[in-house]
Image (tube, rainbow, N blue to C red):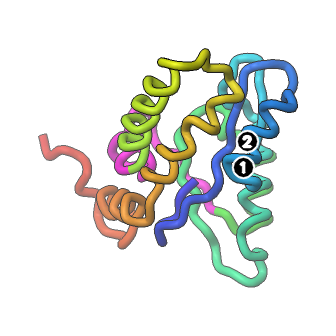
Amino acid sequence: AIVSDGTALPPTFIFQGKSVTHEMARATCNFDPNCGLAYSASGWIERSIYHEILKHLIDILPAPETRGYKLLIVDGHESHISLYAAQLAIANKLDIVLMPSHTSHLVQPLDVGVFGPLKMLYSAAMTKHSVSHLILPHDVPMIINDAYHRSFTRENIMSAFQKTGLSPLRGVDALPED
């Protein structure tokens, strides 16, 4: 998650499997002790994982009674849609906006200005690492570390919010005229 002030919140690593191994936990903590760690049969996000991420986000925000509402923009993936998530958001002054399908490349700040550089830098790091090592799942946090910190910069994040028209808030001009 990223914030319009240029802040990047610690990521959650989702591994494929039935449980978390010691190596996965250690690798994730070495990346950032505040990172989330989850697993699923597919290696992709599931509703229960999203609920944990949402609770972690709420835990690191100032208490709801000491701040105004916060806006959380997520894609429309089914894992993000549940009564529990809505109740959690309401109780903690979070307004959740679901982006319409196939629009994240236009209106999601992560897609607009951060994931591109991350993918390029991560790909280069994977190529460099794979020349001399067999890459195992628990190697991923270490390999992505430099790429993450070089792409999730204050400048990239703020620029991404500006490009989408979300901060400073202005009319959507990201959509093509024709």
- Residue at 57% in and 63% down: 71
Foreground pick, 63 / 32:
32
Q: Circle 2 — which element?
A: helix
- Residue at 62% in and 61% down: 95
For the residue carrying disc 2, how many other residues have a C-alpha within 10 Å: few (<14), some (14-19), or many (20+)? many
Give the percent coordinates (x, y) of residue 171. 29, 64
Q: Is residue 165 left or right of residue 126?
A: left
The magenta stretch spans residue 155:
no
Foreground pick, 69 / 45:
45
Q: Circle 1 — which element?
A: loop
Q: In this view, does 27 lie to the left or right of 160?
A: right
Residues at marks 1 and 2 touching, judged by CB atoms closer than 8 Å? yes
| Foreground disc of the pair 1, 2 | 2
* Residue 32 against residue 94 in the figure, above or below: above
State the extent of the magenta-drawn residues as a range.
Answer: 95-113
Foreground pick, 123 / 178:
123
Foreground pick, 57 / 84:
57
Q: Is residue 62 left or right of residue 100?
A: right
Give amino acid for label 1.
Cys
**Res 35 label:** 1
Give the percent coordinates (x, y) of residue 157. 42, 60
